[in-house]
Image: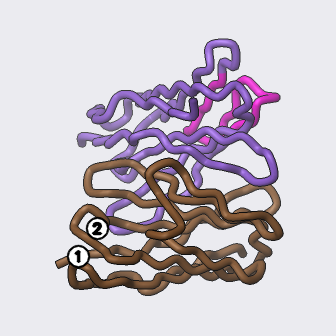
Amino acid sequence: GEQVEQLPSILRVQEGSSASINCSYEDSASNYFPWYKQEPGENPKLIIDIRSNMERKQIQELIVLLDKKAKRFSLHITDTQPGDSAMYFCAASAYTNAYKVIFGKGTHLHVLP
Amino acid sequence: GALVYQYPRRTICKSGTSMRMECQAVGFQATSVAWYRQSPQKTFELIALSTVNSAIKYEQNFTQEKFPISHPNLSFSSMTVLNAYLEDRGLYLCGAQGDTEVFFGKGTRLTVV
């Protein structure tokens, strides 16, 4: 299977707190896991990604964790700000002769002031 | 930088008619192009993945007869929605792959009336 499950679908957090989004995948050949942020009316933008040779990656307030055995990966946003409010999509991808990116269903993050 | 342009950004077509949308990669060579559809309140469904010098591979529930795709070179791809009906409405996204990353356009929003 190639499904990517993403939870929660809606996440409300207080400004300054952390937000966590969890995803799981089925295809054991998946080796690239990008995260996208989509604001209303805009295209999804890559915010952070992790490859299967890593377990953790951090870019400023974004942390991604990957557990290959459990086929799970997660995004953690520390010190959330109102500008972090958006739709977030996880994705899993296996490279054969091209990256076939399969998206999760998305998480609508609301950062409350 | 690497950019992906999609046009038109928005279009309205009558039920049963067809419309063509285009995807242009700028600043990089798109060795593969994936077309997605984001239906209202849903995630991005992969329609097909087109790789240069390989056959276009359609996902389950999507066919070449309904969504013919052209990928004539490393910077351009087009897709047509034939005989569009209400269930075809949504945001059609083009994802063009560079060396290691997939870049997305802003999408073509299709309304069917």
Residue A111 image-quadrant placement: top left
Q: Are marks 2 and 1 in contact (CB under 8 Å)?
A: yes
Give the tally of numbered discs: 2
Q: Main secondary structure of the magenta part?
A: strand
Which segment did they paint magenta? A50-66
Judge whether A15 appears above or below B57 on screen. Answer: above
User: Is tag 2's residue or tag 1's residue first in the polypeptide sequence?
Assistant: 2
Residue B112: numbered disc: 1
Q: Which residue is mark 2?
A: B89
| Of residues B35 and B104, the one drawn nearer to the viewer in this rendering | B35
- The hue of chain B in the figure is brown
Q: Amino acid at mark 1?
A: Val
Q: Residue at x 64, y 28 (%)?
A: A27
Left or right placement of residue B6 versus residue B49 in this view: left
Residue A92 counted in the magenta span: no
Q: Horizontal and vertical percent for residue A33?
A: 65, 38
Tag 2 subunit: B
Left or right placement of residue A100 versus residue A91 in this view: right
